[in-house]
Amino acid sequence: MSQKDLLKERNIFLEEESRTTQIALKEILTFDTYFNEIDEHTELNSLFSKTADHLNAFTNFQSIAFQILNKDRSFQFGFSSGSHDTIALHNELQKHIDNRTYAWALRQRKAISTPLHHGEGFIIVHALFSKSALLGMFIGIHKNNIIETSQTLPDLLSVLLQRTAYYVTLLTKYKKLDTQVQGLKGEIKQKNNALLNALQQANNLETTREQILCNVSHEFRTPISAIIGLLSLMKDSENLTGEHREYINMATRSAGCIMGFIDDLLLYVQLKSSERPPLAAPHRLKENLISLLSEEWNTQGNINASLIYDFRLRETYLFDLKMLNNALRRLLNNAQKFTPQGKIQLLVHEVSKHNNVSCIKFQVSDSGIGIADRDKDYILQAFTQADLSNTREKEGIGIGLPLASLIIETLGSQLHCESEVGQGSNFSFTLTLTGL
């Protein structure tokens, strides 16, 4: 062959190599684009199928197969396509395992090409590695020995298979994470079901408790009413000594206290078990507050009680007189109970106003013993007191403030507490009232 013919043949070879390289680089770029969309639902064979499509785009394989490494370090065919079935590929591959070509490919981490034992062509094997982890093996059947006859195809093949190994690892992690997520979802579902069951049980217990309180309150109310009635009749007797009358007065006051506790329990159960809308009607706010202080206030020790009323407020507003007085009376009684001496103030002032609608803040302030920070979280819980040692010292069943808070919620507001030990307490809430 002349020098000219050799040069011509070489040019043809180089042009073919260049064309193949360009196609291969394009396929590698589009390969990554496709696999950016993989997720935990992507199947492994789908990944291998896409790799086979990209490989065949720049060199035609007669058959392509992938083996997956099992946990027991054995290899298993996972994907195959082309003119050779899995049995033929297995038989051919067994020959190369016997002559150590397979093991040689594993150590080299590059494409190894040897002639077929059955038929014409070449078998190409290439290990799939991700960093130091062996994942499987690529097997290709080609009519030509492309590993020896091409300068660029072996490297391009290795690049594409390395990317495949990377995405196999990524897909494995996705599926592992998905399994963990599904497991966590199952645990969360179980815990949610357990929580719902616990909440249902708690609601049932709360309903049962409220029913018991209601029944017990009603049962106590009848005999206590009879006792108060009989004490009243006894008091009218002419044969009583002064000492006996004092006993009767003490018994009447004690029965009245018990009746007050029963009324509190009934109101608490009523408000907890049903939504009672405020019964708004026109009332003179300032006159009502003055009357509340004068009629309900009982001086205890050296205490100065006063009303501080904002002059900007109107005379008449729409509000639930009974519920408002009930809440304020409990806040005032609580202030009186824990203020041995000093002052108690009922402050009422306008926070904001729009037309005839005013936002009015009600605040009961005292200079009493105050409340510790650790106790502020549960003083509004029913049947508790900030200091259990006060149970015998201070009368009550621990329902005054919780009931006041519940009433204020019924009025559409929230009870707030600011306090410091030894410096007194401030209990406040805000109502939006329409002025007339």
Image (cartoon, rainbow, N blue to C red):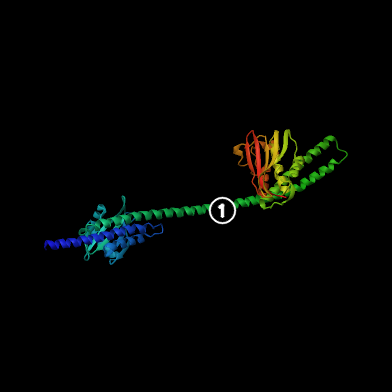
Q: Quadrant of the N terminus?
A: bottom left
Which of 93/309 is in front?
309
Q: Is residue 284 above or below residue 123?
A: above
Q: How far across and down, in percent of the image, does residue 191 sit?
A: 52, 52
Q: How far across and down, in percent of the image, does residue 275 sit?
A: 67, 53
Q: Quadrant of residue 35?
A: bottom left
Q: Is residue 297 above or below residue 137?
A: above
Which of 18/75 is in front?
18
Q: Quadrant of residue 421?
A: top right
Q: Amino acid at mark 1?
A: Leu
Which residue extends farthest left?
2
Q: How far across and down, in percent of the image, does residue 27 sit?
A: 31, 60
Q: Is residue 182 left or right of residue 302?
A: left
Which residue extends farthest right?
238
Q: Is residue 199 left or right of residue 337?
A: left
Q: How many marks?
A: 1
Residue holding disc 1:
196
Q: Is residue 390 above or below residue 29?
A: above
Which residue is located at x 40 percent, y 54 percent?
Answer: 174
**SS for tag 1?**
helix
Is residue 394 in view from this perspective?
no
Q: Is residue 45 left or right of residue 313?
A: left
Which of 216/360 is in front?
360
